[in-house]
Image (tube, rainbow, N blue to C red):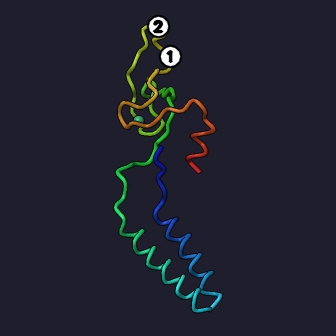
Amino acid sequence: MTDYIERDELVSYFKEIATETLRDGSVQCVLGAGVIAHMIVEIKEFPAADVRPVVRGKWYWDNYKYDWTCYACGWPVDYHNPKDPWGKPEYSYCPNCGAEMVTDCNKLEEDEG
Ligand SMILES: [Zn+2]
């Protein structure tokens, strides 16, 4: 599995290391900080992966639209399950915006910060 990281967070992390390294003041530490500074330049110039952030949502019943609606984009799904015409859609993703529908509402609240 491929891991993706936040470029700005990695740069901040290396800047902190460089700052700590420079506090020592020795020639070796100054050289080490120079290497870290070069790594920061390389990280900033490295091509980004073609990914997009995960958007999570849930289906909720909208009394105004009178339909199940995507929490993430507000799209009324207009889907009716033949077995349960008023039941919640069975889509695990919103067909309109691609939001992943979560069944665990705590997970959705965690993403909202
Ligand atoms: Zn949506």
Q: Residue at x 43, y 78 (%)?
A: 38
Regarding ligand 1, which quadrant of the image does it lie in?
top left
**Is 67 or 41 nearer to us in this picture?**
41
Q: Amino acid at mark 1?
A: Gly
* Other-residue count near label 2 (Cα within 10 Å), few / some / many at <14 / 14–19 / ≥20: few
Residue, far top = 83
- Give coordinates of residue 37: x percent, y percent: 47, 79
* Other-residue count near label 1 (Cα within 10 Å), few / some / many at <14 / 14–19 / ≥20: few
- Residue corresponding to mark 1: 87
**Is 48 or 107 nearer to us in this picture?**
48
- Give coordinates of residue 5: x percent, y percent: 49, 57
Residue, far front = 28
- Residue corresponding to mark 2: 83
- Give coordinates of residue 59: x percent, y percent: 49, 29
Quick check: marks 2 and 1 in contact, CB under 8 Å? yes
Q: Secondary structure at mark 1?
A: loop
- 75 on left or right of 105: left
Q: Quadrant of residue 40?
A: bottom left
Q: Residue at x 46, y 27 (%)?
A: 92
